[in-house]
Image: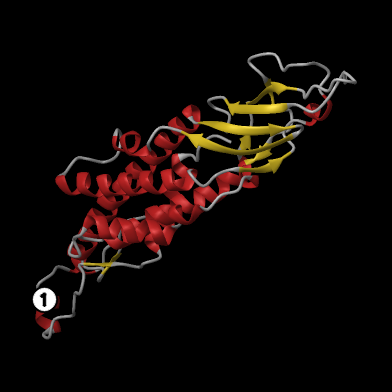
Amino acid sequence: MPAPQASQMQQLARAKFMSFNLKVPANWQSPSDQDQYDRAFQASEKNTTPGMPPLFQPATMNKYHTDSQKMHVAKIGAFIDGTCSAICSAWSQWQTAATMVGIVVSGPVASVGQIVGPPLQPLILASAPKASPMELKYSNVIATVISTGWLAFTATVKIPGLPLFPMFAAFPGPLVPPPGIPNPAPVPFAALTQVPVSISANILKAQMVAQLGDPQAPFHSQLFEAIATAFEQCYNLWKVSTMVTKVMGMGAIPTFAPPIVPAGPVIGTATMMPSGFT
């Protein structure tokens, strides 16, 4: 399966952010002199329509509050959408370039291996929101933490002894010809041994908050949680629908003398070619 679509991650992140039910202006309280407050506004200003989608709730339906809410909806919504788009673009580029090396072949069974792919940080930052110093700061934190978490996660991914090469149980020849034979039995990425703790929403959010290091930064905790949650949810969908293909098995059959066995199990190695995660 291709990397998650930006629209998918955007919807998940927006849904998570809306669940916080944040109100703007924050900490607004009704005035002590309600009559005077009411007289300060025209009738048309007292009950206006809020902006959609409701990433924020206005403190009241007063025009000045709904105007503030609409501004926040537009600004935060654009940041969420731009960040998710950048992450999905980077994920797609990583998936196209990633390979798996050091796979051990023993007859039909493949095991171990190591994923090798480009770091996500520069790929994310290439198109992440950077229109203001605050956007740049948030984007840099998100890109760095996701990249570090993804690298730590992919280091744990191994093939747990899977029958990727059924024909290698009794291969009719002394040597598998180069460049090797692609695995005829693809398996889902979810079948690989893996420890995805470093890309869990809780870990990603905690590291983003710590790396930002600014407890007064507006809505940072909710933004980071929304992005981290959407990333984890997209990964959980991706891993069950992405197949491991283009694993090129190489090696020779063991020789026995006497007698000479015309076919035998292949003993060797394998490498997954780029774009093998499909």
Residue for point 41% across, 53% down: 13
Q: Nearer the viewer, residue 82 or 71?
A: 82
Q: Residue furthest bottom?
A: 32
Tell me the residue at 13%/81% (across/down): 31
Label 1 sits on what residue type? Arg
Residue 166: which quarter of the image?
top right
**Residue at disc 1, secondary structure:** helix
Where on the picture, by quarter, is residue 161? top right
State which quarter of the image contains the N terminus. Answer: top right
Q: What x and y, as percent, mark residue 243?
A: 63, 36
Q: Residue at x 19, y 69 (%)?
A: 43
Residue 167 appears left or right of 217: right
- The quadrant holding residue 170 is top right
| x and y percentages locating residue 16 in the rendered image | 42, 60
Q: Position of residue 57 (x, y in %)?
A: 31, 65
Judge left or right: residue 215 versus residue 242.
left
Above/below status of 212 relative to 127? below
Q: Is residue 36 visible?
A: yes
Q: Where does residue 77 sit, x and y in percent of width and height?
A: 32, 50
